[in-house]
């Protein structure tokens, strides 16, 4: 029953953590975020515009990220997102929670470094 693609429920539960993590170091636009998730997960996790952009808008509405439009010569206008001070705090808390969850799952299943 194992598949290469990550189950939709797992993706849904970790989406905020993934996005906030990618915005930790530098501002990024939505397409770049999508491609980085796909690349770093080796194709196991994919976000399409229909699910990614509403999530980015929600994170922005919560005050965890801030978006700004950037126009570059010869390119279309893109919205770049970066973490806010609140977003940094939320990311730290989500990472801590995720680590505790993974450790607990590992203890239950006997899988080390789950």
Image (cartoon, rainbow, N blue to C red):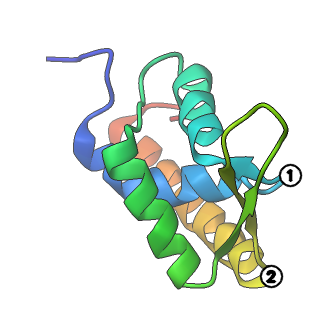
Q: Residue at x 57, y 49 (%)?
A: 18
Is 11 left, or right, of 21 in this rendering?
Answer: left
Estimate the x, y position of residue 106 in percent, counting from the top left: 45, 42
Residue located beneath label 2 in the image:
85
In the image, residue 50 sits, relative to residue 39, either above or below, namely below
In the image, residue 11 sits, relative to residue 70, either above or below, namely above
Is 19 left, or right, of 48 in this rendering?
Answer: right
Estimate the x, y position of residue 10 in percent, counting from the top left: 32, 46
* Residue 38 marker: none
Residue located beneath label 1 in the image:
25
Quadrant in which residue 17 is drawn: bottom right
Q: Secondary structure at mark 1?
A: loop
Q: Residues within 10 Å of mark 2 (few under 14, many from 20)?
A: few
Residue 33 can be seen in this image: yes
Residue 104 can be seen in this image: no
Quadrant in which residue 1 is drawn: top left
Q: Residue at x 71, y 69 (%)?
A: 92
Q: Earlier in the sequence, mark 2 or mark 1?
A: 1
- Spatial CA distance of label 2 from label 1 is 13 Å
**Count of numbered marks:** 2
In the image, residue 33 sits, relative to residue 66, either above or below, namely above
């Amino acid at each position: 029953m194992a598949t290469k693609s990550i189950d939709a429920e797992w993706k849904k539960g970790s989406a905020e953590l993934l996005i906030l993590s990618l915005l930790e170091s530098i501002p990024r636009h939505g397409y770049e975020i999508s491609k980085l998730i796909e690349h770093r997960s080796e194709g196991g996790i994919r976000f399409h515009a229909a699910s990614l952009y509403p999530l980015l808008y929600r994170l922005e509405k919560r005050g965890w990220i801030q978006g700004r439009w950037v126009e570059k010569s010869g390119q279309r206008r893109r919205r770049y997102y970066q973490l806010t001070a609140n977003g940094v705090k939320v990311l730290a808390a989500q990472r801590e929670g995720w680590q505790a969850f993974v450790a607990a799952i590992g203890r239950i299943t006997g899988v080390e470094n789950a």
